[in-house]
Each structure stands twice: as C-alpha cells, then as structure tokens.
Image: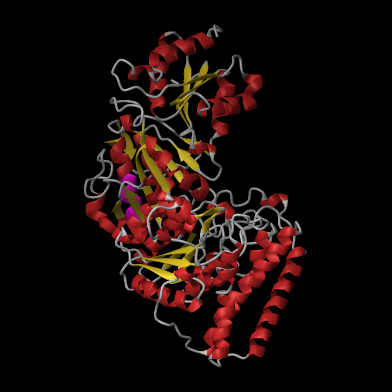
Amino acid sequence: MPSPHTITYRAAVLEALFGEMRRDGSVILMGEDIGAAGGVFKQTEGLFAEFGSERVIDTPISESGVFGIAVGAAMTGQRPVFEVMFGDFITLIMDQLVNQAAKINYMSAGQFRVPLVVRTAVGVGGNLGPQHSQSLHAWPVHIPGLKVVMPATPADAKGLMAAAIRDDNPVVFFEDRMLYNLREAVPEGVHVVPIGSATVKREGRDVTIIAVSRMVHTALAAADLLAKEDISAEVVDPRSLMPLDVETLVASVKKTSRAIVVDGGYRQYGITGEIAATVAEHAFDWLDAPVLRIGGANVPIPFSKTLEPLVLPDAQRLARDATALVRGQR
Amino acid sequence: MTSSPQMATVSPVPSIASAEEGLRLLRAMKLIRAFEEQVRNLSAAGVIPGLVHLCAGQEAVAVGVCSLLRADDMIASNHRGHGHCLAKGGDVGRLLAEIMGRRTGYGLGRGGSLHIFDAANGNLGTTGIVGGGIPLATGAALSAKRQARGQVTAAFFGDGALNQGLLFEVMNMAAIWRLPVLFVCENNGFGEFTAIEDVTAGADPLARGQAFGIPSETVDGMDVLAVRMAAQTAIERAREGNGPSFLVCKTYRYGGHHAGDKQDYKDAEEAKAWRLKDPIERLSRLLKESGLASEAAIAALTQEIDREVRAVVDLAKVTPLPADDDFEAHLYA
C-alpha cells in the first residue's frame, strides 16, 4: 500500500484526475470554467497548465450540447470527464444521459461503449437557494445502463474517481461541495476503489445506519451521541448507489437487526426507499423493527438562513430517531 | 422555405467522372429504394413490428454524401435512417434482421429501425430522438480532430430538427472548435405531419448555420450529383481543418412520416411534381443520355438488386428471434 497523506476532498479528486490523465491520453475534461479559471470551486486547478486546452476543454454554457458531444467522443475513443457545475443542472443533460449514454452499449449490442464520467457538485449549504442546492442522484440511479457513485471521504473520492474514469460505462459521480475542505488521510499514488463496494465506517451491534455522501459524517456523529446512551450503532456507506453492494448492507442489518437509511436527497421516491426495501426483502426475518427512512425535506431548498438548516437531518435528530427505534418506541 | 420543387438552388452543372461511378451511385440509390419497398410491405404484412420511417425519395442525399466518405469517416443518422445505413456500407441482411427484431440484427434485434448501430462502417446510429444524432457526430468529430487522421463526420437530420435547441448548441461548438463535421439537413418539407413553414421562423433555414459563421449551402437534394458536389467541398473543408459545413438538401418524402401514415396533409399536385424530380430516374436518364449506360444495363441492375433484396427478405424471415439470454446482454460494458 502506498503511504497516505492528509489532503482535502477537493485535492483528492484532483489527484485522481492528474493520475488518470497522465496514465491515459484519451482522458479529456469538459466543462464550464474548468480550464484557465481552474473551476468555480478550484476543483480543476492546475490541470489546464499541465494538459492544455486540447484536453481540458472550456465549454460554453450549453450543458445539453456539450454533454451530447462528450457522448459522441466517448463512443469514438475518448474518455471524457464532463463536469456539471451544480448538480441541479443535470436536468439539462437528462435526454443525452437517459436516452443516449445509458442505452448505447445495449442498443448496439456492445459495438459502441460510452466510457465517460459526469461529475457534479451537490449539497445543501451556503445559502445558494432552490436551484443550486439539490442532490438529484435519485434521477440517474433510476436508469438501467448508468452507474452512480457518491463518495463521502477524500480517500473514496480519489479511488472512485479513478475507477469511474477507467470504467467502460457512463458513471455519474456526485460530490458534496460541503465536503470539499474535509481533510483526511488519502493513499498517495494510484488508488482505485471498486465501484459497487460498500464500506463499514464504524462497527456496532444495535442498529445499522446506512448513509451516503455527507450523511455518512452525520451518521458517525450520531453514532458518537448514541454511544453515550449505550447504543452501539454500525455505520455503513454504500459509496456506490448503482451497482449497490447489497451483500455488505444486508450482512450488517442481519447482525444488528435494525436499519436506518439516511440520505441528503429529497425523501419522496428517493434512494432511502429503494435501499430500505432492498434491505427488508433480504433481511426481513432478522429485523426487529421497521426500516426507518430519513431524507432531505420534501420542499424546494430555501435560501434564508433560518430555513435552509431545516432541510437536512442533523446528528441530534438522527440519534434521537435511532434511540427510539432501538428502544422499541417507533 | 417552401416544399415547392421549383425552389432548388441553381448551381454549376455537376458531372459524372465515369460510367463505373455513375452506376455505383445508381446502384446505391436503387438498393435503398428496393429495400424500403420491401420494408413497407413487411410492415404492412405485420412481419415487422412497431413503426418504420421510410426514406424513399430522399436517396440522393444519403448516397451523395456517403459515397464520398472513407470507411473510417463516421455518420450519425436519424429516425429515417435506413438509407444512411446502407449508403455507409451497412449489411442489407443485418439491417433488415434488426428492423424485423431478429437476433442476427445489428443490435440483437433489441433496437429496431430507430436504433441501428454499425461500428465497423462508422455508423453511430439511427435514433429515436429528433436531433439526437447531431451531438454524437460532433463528438466523433472532436475525437477525429484529436486523433488527427483526417477523419470527418456527418450528421443527417430532417427539417424537424431545425427547431431543436440542441442543433444550435452543437453548431456553436463545432464552429468555435473548428470540428470536421457536416451538418446535413434533409429538408423534406414535413416534420412528422406538419409542414415546415407552419412551425419554422426565418426566411431560410440556411440562416441557422450562417448565424454561427458556418459555410452553409442550399442543395438540390433530388440530384445525387449536386449533393456530391456540395458534399465534396464540405468534406475537403473539414479534412483540411477548416471546420464544419451546413448543407440544406431540398428533398421530398414519398411516403408518410411512418409506413401506414395516410398522408392526408399532403397536396397531391405537389407530390406529383416532386416525383418528376425523382433522383433515381434523373440519374438513369443522365447515364443514358450521356451514353454511359444503356437501357438494358440499367434494367439488369434493377433486376439484380430486386433479386438481392428479395433473397435477403427470405433469409431474414427464417433467422432466429432473440432468446432470453439476449434480454439483459450488454446492459453494461
């Protein structure tokens, strides 16, 4: 194993991009302000200087057209990493993503592959309002033919970006922009995390909290609070939503007999429902309580400082709900 | 912007280099016409499920452009794409098998007429989304530019796609990045059942390309030689690194939007006038008048193609349907 160093989430993704672009000349980046400007979140800083405008392509604000071009480039030998500045804007590429990228390998019976990555920054925070705060990961994960990953830590962000670029399928990579400054140990050099592998972030006996992206950190904080109540929570991070590592999730739930699924996207028809149902189908006889779903509020994400904090669950609320679940009060 | 056949632009008289070239173009157009006729019959008979969109009348555009493309040049087609697939070198049998939903088709019979992909011949696919192939061809042009092997790409689309915003986004990027792509509009006068002039602003579709500084030209899409002449210039421009071109080929869809469409929205006189400009008849006449091919040689060619296509139909009818194993195959690479 290469030795770890402590860097931010932002720098970890950047390390993967540098590594993969040096390794494979067919990797190109496309997006708004990603070149000379280095990205609106400084998430592509330095790439333009090393790889130039031919591989780090500043695009017009034409998400649909640019992404369609990226799909065509992916069909013909490139490995584009297409950046959607805010996750809310994936709505603008939905036709290309759903009707073209996801289906071309299937429709062409493998004659054409679409090896590309859509990377996009999501998450509530910073008072950016209803059109710059959403986590719409439940949209692409509904579509057969797409893979969807949602790393929570710098190390996983680096490893999953490398895996996404190397994958021969379209992969949508959701990064929570409120995690960008999170610093943790990250393996130096080549680091690849297999898509479709979950990880147990904290072991426990009484309840499994399945959480993705930023909610993993909320779940870990809740687990600390629960420990003070003598409740031992296990925290599992799926890391990939498609394919979902059902085996690891179900093994944990069979061990603890209780499950809570936490996500930052809208709760209605969201991934918490899918994961809860999957766990219930596979571990029904082991469950001592109904699977609990906790998601983002079902409202457009409000701008005001008093309202925005109401959108996402926090550690206190999660710990309270978990306590009730474990004590049979739900 | 009318579907009147008298509107075709006056251009220098195109010529044929040789009898061989003339017969090759004639053969390619006759193959498409004969193929579409069989597809129409098979659709009417229920042998082909679903909907098919036929291109009889428009053969000169596909053949004119594709006859100048190299094997490693790429095209993206649209929903009316059988002609493009054949003109780019597609296999008649595999094409028909796909349209019939057979496992010997290009996509194991899972795509059908609207989703024909032929990687070996540089065909990025027919598509069910109007305008959907335009960015794919342009993305392939981005690859071509990076790979620097002089490849060009062509996007075929109908006048219906002239009102898709995607076209303008992609034209803009093709122009600023000087990508080697031809935007080939087959203006057959109708977007589905609606006349183009009822739904399209502006005096001339050419302005859509000109707005982006893209060299744009109106072409007589019923004359394969005129299409070739315009395409030749556009292809050279692309190969030399001078960016995209926009060709608006004025043509006519003999059939309806799809096979079985009653076409009560068409004017009978207008349809008759377009038939007089038939691209196959026109080239046949030219070959005969210029002494490059005899009446008998052309008749023999016609018979040969009919036999070939009929044999393909007979074979396709006995090819296997997809099996359970094919249901999820290639869902992921």
x and y percent of residue B197 in the render? 46, 55
Residue at horizontal 43%, vertical 61%?
B1
Q: Is residue A21 magenta?
A: yes
- Which residue sits at x=39%, y=73%? B235
Q: Position of residue B224 (x, y in %)?
A: 50, 76
Q: Is residue A87 above or below residue A229?
A: below
For residue A323, above or below residue B285: above
Picture residue at 53% right of the left edge, 60% below the top: B125
Image position of A144 (left or right of A21)? right
- Which residue sits at x=36%, y=27%? A130
Q: Position of residue A225 (x, y in %)?
A: 39, 13
Judged by its main secondary structure, the magenta piece is helix
Is residue B230 positioned above or below B99 on the image? below
> In the rendered structure, which segment of residues is drawn in magenta?
A15-26
Q: Is residue B273 left or right of residue B35?
A: left
| Residue B4 visible in the shown view | yes
Q: Measured along the vertical axis of the image, is residue A207 above or below residue B256?
A: above
